[in-house]
Amino acid sequence: MPAYAVLIHPGHESISYEHADRLVLQELESMAAAMTEVPAEMTRTEIAGCPALSFLTGHPLTAFDIRQLYRMSFVYAVFECRSCEGRDVLLPIDAPDIGLFDDSLVTMLKYAGKTNPIFTRLLVNLAVQASAFAGRARLQMLDPVAGKGTTLFEGLVAGHDVCGIEISPEAVQDGIVHMKKYLETGKFKHRVERQRISGPNRSFRAERTVFEISKSKEDAKKGLSASCEMVCGEARHADGIFRKERFHVIVGDLPYGVRHGNITSRTTGSPTRNPGELVAGCLPAWVRCLRPGGTVALSWNAFVLPRVEMDRLFQEAGLIVLDGTPYGRLEHRVDQAIKRDVIVARKPGDAVLPMEKNL
């Protein structure tokens, strides 16, 4: 049987030192479900003192399988294990090109309170793999609590088209400035459009900034492009900002502090830091933007809102909470004040688009 080894990213333990190994195995199980060759006999090991994971497969990994591996948040490098002249050797497997962007789009954006980018990738992966659209190369993704865009940029790196809503004009502007500077420095072909949005009878107002991006004019003509949309507005109006059933996945890291709050009702004009109030006030609108078979993956501080309460809010919104392996027991301690948990839930109904494995 072919044997492989994965060198674990040196920064992966920054998510949670205590629970890092468990999160590795849960993410691998989630991503492996869509692979042609499912890993077996997974073993936590070390390579020259560095943390690693070894596994076997029935047949050699396909190009799609390798792409899946390199999308995982904990993967630093992938090797094929071989014997050569009586010695065990590791043959490196090159990382494939996944989208228009590399990790620098995410890592170059630095600010206080930024969500760990490795955890952000884990969250995106869980949402995609739990959906009826797992295996498709390009999805429509929404982050309704986008901040300065960490999750959006991670979605772009994964090859998806992304949209985000953020209530803070300063945060939106910082995200736009970062995106424009990155595209100009990288000499990407891009077009930027701004549009003001208002609801019926001016029930809400928002401002949309759309980036249409490609490597070249020729790529744009071939459809080899990406789209990033940043909206300055309130998350509870998502279904007025975007069309019904537009998104395959909704991904968000709910606010831990008051600076990341959002307005949740027409009678309350001040932001809330309570994830329960935020979800109760906004989730119905988010679900209306989600395709049947699509998923919502949110992380939050379980010290503020117990898991059972979050489950109840999702079920009341008509979603099916996935609480079995590998989507249960994703909670992990970030620091003394934050125990981060993740909920993954699916919208009932059949996927509109056929299942494909696109490279």
Image: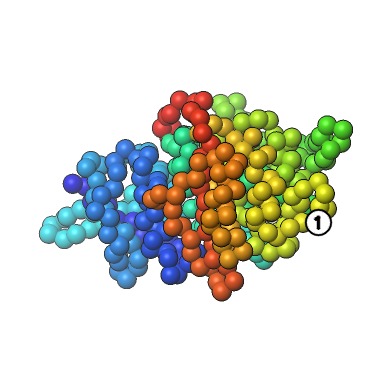
Residue at x 41% of width, y 32% of height: 357
Q: Position of residue 63 (x, y in %)?
A: 35, 39
- The relative height of residue 106 versus residue 98 in the rendered view (above or below) is below
Q: How is the image coloured?
A: rainbow
Q: Residue at coordinates 87% horizontally, 33% vertically from top-left? A: 201
Q: Is residue 190 visible in this depiction of the protein?
A: no
Residue 219 x/y as whole percent: 57, 31
Instruction: Give the residue furthest to the left.
Output: 86
Q: Secondary structure at mark 1?
A: loop
Of residues 194 and 353, the one nearer the viewer is 353
Q: Residue at x 62, y 38 (%)?
A: 287
Residue corresponding to mark 1: 270
* Front-lying residue, 28 or 204: 204
Q: Position of residue 256 (x, y in %)?
A: 65, 62
Counting labels gives 1
Image quarter hosting the C terminus: top left
Most distant residue in the right direction: 201
**Amino acid type for the residue under numbered disc 1:** Ser
Q: Is residue 285 visible?
A: yes
Side (left or right) of 71 relative to 203: left
Q: Count residues near mark 1 (Cα–Cα under 10 Å), then give few for <14, some for 14-19, many for 20+.
A: few
| Residue 60 as seen in the image, left or right of residue 183 | left
For this view, does 302 lie left or right of residue 74? right
Relative height, residue 221 to residue 158 (above, below): above
Give residue 68's position: percent from left, percent from top. Answer: 40, 44
Residue at image coords 74%, 49% = 264
